[in-house]
Amino acid sequence: MKSNWVFRILPVLFVPVFSVPVFSVPVFSVAAQRRLEVMDYGGQVQVVDLRDQKPVFLKKKVFIENSVQIKVPENQKIILRQGTDSYLTILAHSDLKIFFDKENQNKMSLEITRGSLLLVLRSGESIFVSGPIFSFEVKNTEVLLNYQNGLLEAQVLDGELDFRGLGRDDSVVLKKLEIASFQADLENAGPIVDVFLKGRKVARGLLSPMRPLEPAQKEKILKEIASLNLARKKSVEKATKVIDPSLICKSPFAKFNQCSWTCLNNPKDATRCEYQKKNVRCLRQRCFADGRWSDPTELAPSSCLIPLKVGACGY
């Protein structure tokens, strides 16, 4: 596509020296962990190894640690796990590339041409998200990002996000169940970014005010989070049945003298222990030698996580 550069002579220092309609493919990048585990995917999801442009055979429980391009068609998605309890879900009509920097401890970046990305970051994990018209960090937050044709939208289900356009001073802090968007100014179908002296870039556009998440929007995110929680549960149960016979307790699987922390009476599709609701409790139980869960102890609600936790009892 032909690029028309618009030069401007300006008398004041630190004002734009030129404006550039961004004709390259719109992308946003994510700096993150060293590899991603495939948890679930649709049958028509296409993955290409960028080293040799050859198709990659997808299957569950494999790791992506080399640069790839992923295309997700209509009515499909792919769920990837980062670390032990954070997820990246690439939804339908998305086209992206994942890069791994072998010279920098295999650091990961992600470039999206178009589409939607659900980030579920837990246990204090953070990801730096950037692109032609935006740049911010997502930390310990559940957020759905949609990017299409110079329009970026963020829907926060839980946590907090400092949301803004690239290089701009105006921002909005999104909290639980809030939404905002940034619409870039367009020229010849590309977003416009002003380039200042010393290379500083500022996206032209309009930041919307914060507004409450609508029920239908909330329901969509909850559905996706419930889907990835189910994928994680199936993955753990399948692996433990085959690999480790020492897991004598079931629902959840655990070894002798391990404990589980369960959020009882929690709403079916909840993504966290909603202890403020009636009859919701956090219960710790210990795995006995005969395969029974017993020794129940009620704890502070903050001790319970979704999905449930199994590990050393600590007492």
Image: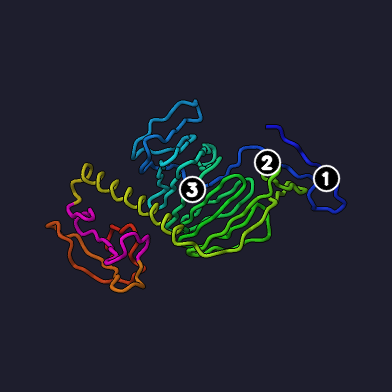
**Are there few (<14), some (14-19), or many (20+) residues within 10 Å of tag 3?**
many
From which residue to which does the magenta span run?
Answer: 248-273
Secondary element type, mark 1:
loop
Marks 1 and 3, Cα distance to the nearest angstrom? 37 Å
Q: In this view of the protein, which residue sits in the foreground, 210 or 293?
A: 210
Q: Which residue is mark 3?
A: 117
Residue drawn at the location 32% of the way across and 64% of the way down: 267
**Quadrant housing residue 27:** top right
- In this picture, is 15 found above or below 78? below
**Residue in the picture at 49% in, 26% down:** 53
Q: Amino acid at mark 1?
A: Arg
Give the class, few, some or many, for how many residues have Cα within 10 Å of label 1's Cα (few <14, many ≥20).
few
Residue under pointer 2? 22
Q: Residue drawn 66% across and 50% down?
A: 184
Tell me the colour scheme of the image: rainbow
**Residue 36: image location, x then y, percent:** 42, 43
* C-alpha span from label 1 to label 2: 17 Å
Circle number at residue 16: none
Disc 2 or 3, which lies upstream in sequence? Answer: 2
**Type of the residue with mark 2:** Val
